[in-house]
Amino acid sequence: MGKDEQYMNKKSLQVKIGKLTLKNPVMGASGTFGYGVEYKKFFSLGDIGGFVTKGLSIEPRKGNPGPRIKETPCGLINSIGLENIGVDAFLGSVIPQLRDIDTKIIVNIFGTEMEEYVELARRLNKLKRIDGLEMNISCPNVKAGGAEFGKDPLVVQTITRKVRDETDKALIVKLSPMVTSIIDIAISAQRGGADAVSIANTYPAMAIDIKSGAPFLGAKSGGLSGPAIKPVTLKLVYDTYGRIDIPIIGVGGISTVEDIIEYALAGASAVQAGTANFINPCATPQLVKQLDKYLSDAGIQQFKSLIGSAFR
Ligand SMILES: Cc1cc2nc3c(=O)[nH]c(=O)nc-3n(C[C@H](O)[C@H](O)[C@H](O)COP(=O)(O)O)c2cc1C
């Protein structure tokens, strides 16, 4: 066993997300990690705790017109518009390329009607190679007049329950930060049978092109991510910890090992790094390595002992 493999498999980094045991708490976040296969050429995917695929819908989607990305101080605004290859292409061409990968694979799913989430869960549940589903509920519920699924606690409970009934895989609900009470939404996800919640998705944002005088992004506005949002999302994790019994996955602006420690202290059992992958495609395995060193330098035996420690 090489030196790197030794720390990758250390028990000190292990965490549990429902029935899933992650070898370490660092995952790649949805929409910034392709379908996983794109990162195979940069590092061994077995070095990280897991990854979440780009959001998948039943039908393929072309997404929004460009420009779709705008850099901002300490972050970026994206308006990809949930472009993806659709579930058939995912099952036919991506899954065969993921067979030999020794890490947890979470498929992010979304739809514009509850039935789409249900159908996706039913079809993906048959696949052994998939370890979990992450529901992106920051999407317009077309049948309910376009309000986001994730904004109404009762809708969140209902849609989570419907998906739960179709899958025995680990079920993660990814919360929108743009809600009146993130605690109420997290409680609803738990009541619906979720194994964990991811906190959180991006924040509505825009940029104006001062030369043309018009919005910069083709879709006019998008979602802000990156280090700029870290303090805001960190507070959402802190506010939610202790109010639910299921684990929290922290997602927002993570780019350093210190960010991971902060999220763990605030109550996150695991983390996802998103925008950081665009700066450095090897960000996630490097964070795992740095986390291992941080813990041993600080004399901390188990990463999980940090979870929620800011409350003690
Ligand atoms: C280009 C881009 C595409 C994204 N696509 C998705 C998506 O398809 N589904 C989803 O749930 N989140 C998506 N996200 C949100 C990220 O998974 C993550 O929640 C957010 O970027 C905050 O983390 P970060 O600051 O580490 O990037 C996307 C983010 C970016 C930057």
Image (cartoon, rainbow, N blue to C red):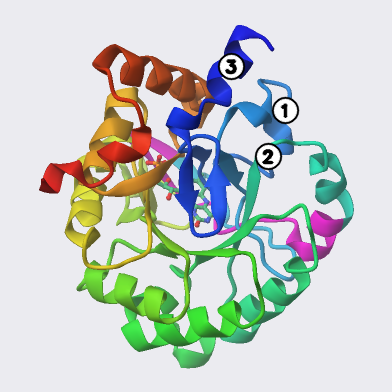
| Residue 272, magenta (yes or no) | no
Q: Which residues are magenta?
A: 70-91
Looking at the rendered structure, the secondary structure element under dot 3 is helix
Q: How many marks?
A: 3
Q: Are marks 1 and 2 in contact (CB under 8 Å)?
A: yes
Please name the residue shown 83% across and 63% down the image.
88
Please name the residue shown 32% across and 47% down the image.
268
Q: For the residue carrying disc 2, how many other residues have a C-alpha within 10 Å: few (<14), some (14-19), or many (20+)?
A: many
On the image, numbered disc 3 is attached to which residue? 6
Direction from residue 263 to residue 142 in the image, left or right: right
Q: Position of residue 184 (x, y in %)?
A: 25, 76
Q: Position of residue 168 (x, y in %)?
A: 65, 71
Q: Amino acid at mark 3?
A: Gln
Quadrant in which residue 73 is drawn: top left
Quadrant in which residue 247 is drawn: bottom left
Looking at the rendered structure, the secondary structure element under dot 2 is loop
Q: Amino acid at mark 1?
A: Lys
- Mark found first going from the N terminus, 2 or 3: 3
Q: Is residue 206 above or below residue 1?
A: below
Residue 36 is tagged as 2
Q: Is residue 15 visible?
A: yes
Can you tell me whether the CB of the residue at mark 3 lies under 8 Å from the nearest atom of ligand 1?
Answer: no
Q: Position of residue 153 (x, y in %)?
A: 33, 82
Q: For the residue carrying disc 1, how many other residues have a C-alpha within 10 Å: few (<14), some (14-19), or many (20+)?
A: few
On the image, numbered disc 1 is attached to which residue? 40
Mark 1 to mark 2 CA distance (whole Å):
7 Å
Q: Amino acid at mark 2?
A: Gly
Direction from residue 260 to residue 287 in the image, left or right: right
